[in-house]
Structures are given as C-alpha cells and as structure tokens.
Amino acid sequence: MRRVLFPVVLACLLLASVAAPVRAAIPIAYLEIPAIGVEAPIYRAPRTGRSWDIDVCGDDVAYLYREGQTAIVLAGHSTGALARLPQATEGDRATLVLGDGWRWVYEIMLTGTVDKYDMSIFDARRGVPANLVIITCTTLGDDWRWAAFAWFLEAESDEWR
C-alpha cells in the first residue's frame, strides 16, 4: 500500500505546483513538524540551471521539483521556517497537509549533512531511500546542507475521522 500511495502524494504536489504560479497567494501544501515548532506553507520554487530560487518563498518552505524524482524534496532558509531543522531527531513526525484535507504523515529516520550538489537526494533508489527529504543551510559552509530524511507512515483524511 505504501508504494502505491507515495506516487499519489508526489503527483498531487506536482499538479498543484504546476497549476499555481510561483509564490502564489495560495500555497500548494503545508508542512508541520510539531517537535521543532514548524508550521509553514509550501510554495513551488522555480528551477534555474542546477539550482532553485527558494528566495521567492521568503521564510516559508519551497518544493523543489526535478524531473524523474522519486522523493519529495522541501527546502527553506536556516533563518526562516526551517531554522530549527537541525534539532529534529529520529522518530519526530513530519506531516504534509494538502489542500484537499489529506494529511500525509512521515517519520524522520535519519538526519545529517549532504553536499549541496548531491542530486541523489531526489532519487530514493540511488541515495538514502527516503520518501521525504527536508533540507536547509548549515554553518559548515556554502557547499553543505542539513537534511532530515523521512519515510511515509500513513495518510489521513478528515472525511475518514
């Protein structure tokens, strides 16, 4: 069941981000990580060459899309909504809340640093096998990013409660 649901949430984010202009008035989803106080809207970030312009998302969270990706990748500035991401620990829950009322719940299973240009984070088959990757800057320099890798746990809908 989990293998079937993951492509569904990835498709929902992609469709919402294609339909919405960059930094639209309405975000494509919301990210919640209660353990570190994250509750922020997610906006689509435009890609330019090898990178994305997450500045258009301000202090909120950016959805990074790359053709062929098998993991959802979110990013944000270390001075914004994801400032406390390095404090996330294994077992913390991260939830994507979609506009249709669905809540996709993930559990953080691994945290650490990744190279800024490591594109394997977009492919759960090559890199860390995570369904959701959340990244922000570190104090280690411009070439490194802090990352939390999470695995899909369950989907909930208000209609089913």
Image (cartoon, grey):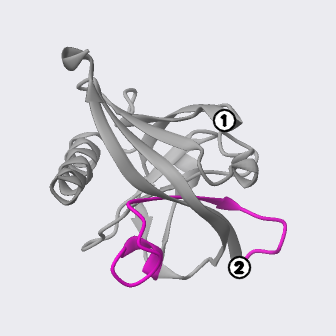
Q: Position of residue 119 (x, y in %)?
A: 46, 80
Indicate whether 66 appears above or below 84: below
What residue sits 33% from the left and 69% below the top?
Answer: 66
Indicate whether 21 appears above or below 65: above
The residue pinned by badge 1 equals 35
Say which label, 2 or 1, has the lower sequence index: 1
**Residue 23 visible:** no
Q: Would residue 138 be counted in the magenta stretch?
A: yes
Q: Amino acid at mark 1?
A: Ala
Locate the C terminus and report the quarter of the image it occupies: top left
Packing grade of label 1 (10 A; few <14, some 14-19, many >=20) is some
Which region shows up in magenta? 120-142
User: Mark 1 falls on what kind of element?
Assistant: helix
Q: Amino acid at mark 2?
A: Asp
Predominant secondary structure, magenta span: loop
Q: Position of residue 89 (x, y in %)?
A: 68, 52
User: Mark 2 falls on what kind of element?
Assistant: loop
Packing grade of label 2 (10 A; few <14, some 14-19, many >=20) is few
